[in-house]
Amino acid sequence: MQALLLFLAIVVNYTARLSVSVAIVAMTDAATTNLDFPEYRWSGVQQSYILSSFYWGYIVTQFPAGFLVRRFGAKAVLLVPTLATAVLSGLTPYCVTWGGWQAFCAIRIVEGLFQGLIFPCIHEHLAKWSPPNDRNRLGAFAYSGADCGSVLAMGSSGLIANGSMGWPGIFYVSAGTCGLWCLLWVILGANNAPSSRLIGSREREHIERSMKRADGFHAQKIPVPWRAIWSSSPFYALLIVRSAQGWANSTMQLQTPSYMHGVLEMDIKSNALYSALPFLAMWGMSYVYLIFADVAMSRHWMSLTTLRKSINTVSYWGPAAALIGIGFLDKTQTTLAIALMTINAGLNAGSGIGSILTIIDMSPNHSGMLMAIVNGIGNIFPLLTPLLVGVIVIDAVSKDSIFF
């Protein structure tokens, strides 16, 4: 139940975060959606500011999130950003109508500030609830919510924008789903097994015993070993890996709709559906990786470290080659471009098992703080990639367009 709640938390927050990449296409080209709603003549640079602005706030609260979740627990801290996202998403159409792209940037910055609390909470919650033997399964399932959220953001946003609600409906739907999750979290969420009202005694004892802390694992307040963290070579290796993932993933998530609209010249419906396809492949492949990891560990094919490094290698080198190939294509090679984007995303699905869950392996007691550090530094690159696109890309058609 807790893994499902975390999965849904990521789904609704990712949908709210990423749907803007489709919304911005609809907002700047009303002819492809519902003509009853305003169209904005924003330049490519201004659009890059909007796409980047979320991460300006997002990286600021990563580090404080590590302290907050240690002090107040995941249940209280995770509720705040999702509730704030619901409110801010609902206000977005009014703010944009009033203040243009500058107001859009401002509300995205504030939304990023709140959502910066999410992943340290997710990691801390997984560490408190997942026995080591179940960590791959529960963790990979929870983090597959990012892929599901990406699919929903890309696939449904274009359909909503083309319907009676127009592009404002994208933000209203996001607000409603975030609000519904908050209600479920308040009723069903619990910081750990001992504090849950819904867990059975056998499951509680199993979780406590498997963590070898049957008499007080969840009550421990262990000081953060700062010197050990910043002098650890595996930690720096992980930091580099997650930074690379942040760069590549943000390029795919933020630029795919603009690439399909500006380069492949797709209408908003086709754009949304084909933009969702790579993330649908990523979502499906995340379970393929999960099954392989479960079988490999249960049959002792390799150690946990070898498993993580092997999956991580496949999920990074394959997508790197695919992204390079996409850069040489144009609108006459649409099928190949979509195929390479789908292969890229599908192979990259292993990054959850390959590197994200490694943080818990390194230190279950400090996983929230480690995630705060890694995610904070790693998300500097998603902040920079839209800005870099806005600077590098040269308009090749009559209106601004964004390319890979």
Image: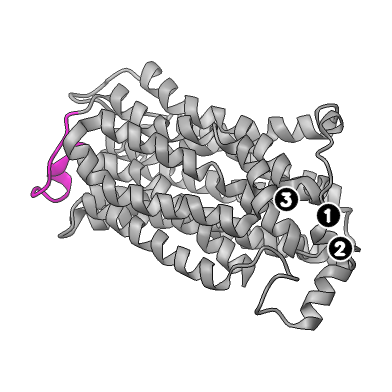
Q: Is residue 152 above or below residue 209?
A: above
Q: Read off the magenta span.
A: 28-41
Q: Which dot, 3 or 2, sits closer to the camera? A: 2
Q: Is residue 132 above or below residue 222?
A: below
Using the numbered discs, state the Cα–Cα distance from disc 1 to disc 2 in whole angstroms.
6 Å
Total labels: the figure holds: 3
> First in sequence: mark 3 or mark 1?
1
Using the numbered discs, state the Cα–Cα distance from disc 3 to disc 1 in whole angstroms.
22 Å
Residue 379 appears in the rendering: yes
Residue 309 occupies which quadrant of the picture? Answer: top right
Element carrying mark 2: loop
Q: Residue at image x 38%, y 48%?
A: 275
According to the image, label 1 marks what residue?
220
Callout 1 touching callout 2 (CB < 8 Å): yes
User: Residue 388: which disc?
Assistant: none
Mark 3: amino acid: Leu
Mark 1: amino acid: Gln
Mark 2: amino acid: Gly
Judging depth in this view, the residue of 404 and 117 nearest the camera is: 117
From the viewer's perspective, tell me whether residue 77 is left or right of residue 368: left
According to the image, label 3 marks what residue?
357
> First in sequence: mark 3 or mark 2?
2
Q: Residue at image x 68%, y 58%?
A: 125
According to the image, label 2 marks what residue?
216
Residue 254 occupies which quadrant of the picture? Answer: top left
From the viewer's perspective, tell me whether residue 83 is left or right of residue 248: left
Element carrying mark 3: loop
Residue 49 occupies which quadrant of the picture? Answer: top left
How far from the left and from the top, in percent, is residue 3? 63, 66
Residue 29 is a magenta residue: yes
How far from the left and from the top, in percent, is residue 201? 78, 82
Residue 134 is a magenta residue: no
